[in-house]
Amino acid sequence: MNAISSWARFLPVMSLLVLVLLCRSAVEGRALDLKKSAPGRVNVDETDEAVSSVVTLLAGLKQPSNLATCGMRPTYQKQAVFRVVAGVESSNRWPWQVALVDTTSKQPFCGGTLIGREHVVTAAHCFDGKNQNDINIVLGEHDRSRPEGTEQQFPVDCVHIHRRYVKGIPYNNDIAVVKLKTAPGHDVMLNDFVMPACMPEKNEFKAGDTCYVTGWGYTNFNDLLVGKRPEVLNEAQVPILSNDQCKQAYGSYISKKMICAGYLEGDRRADTCKGDSGGPLICQRGGVWKLFGVTSWGDNTFCNPSPTDAVPGVYTRVDRYRSWIQSRIEMDSCPSKR
């Protein structure tokens, strides 16, 4: 090996070292500065990010692929290979999905959606008869049967339940915002497995659009009877229905603040079931995924492997609550119900 080829081996490393020195000089040794802005977004100082990226490359570590945005899935995707009802295993495809876990049983009883570094949107009815001190919020979860190294767990700081929430079907205003209890050195780390969903614009999605539902809820009626939940996060593709279509199944129960998704034909069955409550109805627009609905209620016939008639699931329509959600995020206090 000649001298030139020997030096050539070290040129990439030397170039990176020079870049590190230049960046560090420019920012005078400042650490990576993360600043919160609008819900679901994190702004990163571009110069500091350059330093962080170079140091990461030198260390041989993988940077979060979507650090400064919302509604982006990992750049790599495992193909879904297994079988919410009539669904498939999600394979870490939904980084905003969270699990509401009972601290005693260690079992998830509801889902939710991360919309910022400290806030989760879920269903108000998930807290019926529950004490927030008995609940942990788990981010980055996929397979409940084993630790995967992607999980982040936080207790609940406070729960904002919509003041006009009404218990029982039709669960009017079935929406809540949960603030995570973080601490210095223990806050939410955004990465390929933990990323907020974006919020929808008003009337952004319409009947006929195809969206997804996700959760650890029961996948069939027999499992529901014996209390056997799936270990892995499941997903199902569902079409958005018009409210007129939804009223064919549920009549006057359906309000303008609700949305239905699923099928009206008995031979096509894909929907949420018990245990999926609070989880996302997530739709893609402009290359990003947006939280259009919160799993609320429906006819559990969908958990039956051979229903005579299909009925859609009912979801709280998030775009009707954007102002309320934003006001809860901006609150300094933590009331139990506002």
Image (cartoon, helix red, strand yellow):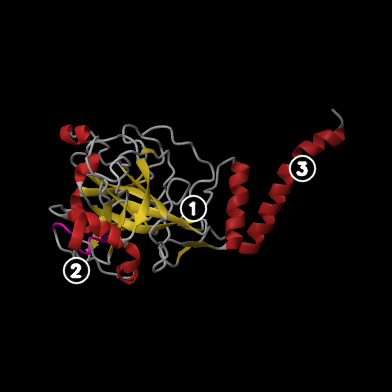
Which of 139 and 304 lies nearest the eye of the viewer? 304
In space, the residues marked 2 and 1 are separated at their CA atoms by 32 Å
Q: Amino acid at mark 1?
A: Met
Q: Is residue 255 above or below residue 9?
A: below
Q: Amino acid at mark 3?
A: Leu
Residue, disc 3: 11
Q: Quadrant of residue 301?
A: top left
Q: Quadrant of residue 216?
A: top left
Nearer to us: label 1 or label 3 = 1
Which of 174 and 244 lies nearest the eye of the viewer? 244
**Residue count near mark 2 (Cα–Cα under 10 Å), binned few <14, some 14–19, many ≥20:** few
Image mark count = 3
Residue, disc 1: 72
Callouts 2 and 3 close, C-beta under 8 Å: no
Q: Earlier in the sequence, mark 1 or mark 3?
A: 3
Callouts 1 and 3 close, C-beta under 8 Å: no
Query: Start and end of the magenta stretch?
Result: 168-176
Secondary structure state at the residue bearing disc 3: helix
Q: Is residue 154 above or below residue 321?
A: above
In space, the residues marked 2 and 3 are separated at their CA atoms by 63 Å
Residue, disc 2: 163
Q: Amino acid at mark 2?
A: Arg
Q: Earlier in the sequence, mark 2 or mark 1?
A: 1
Q: Is residue 320 left or right of residue 307?
A: right
Secondary structure state at the residue bearing disc 2: loop
Q: Residue at x 69, y 57 (%)?
A: 22
Which of 165 and 107 lies nearest the eye of the viewer? 165
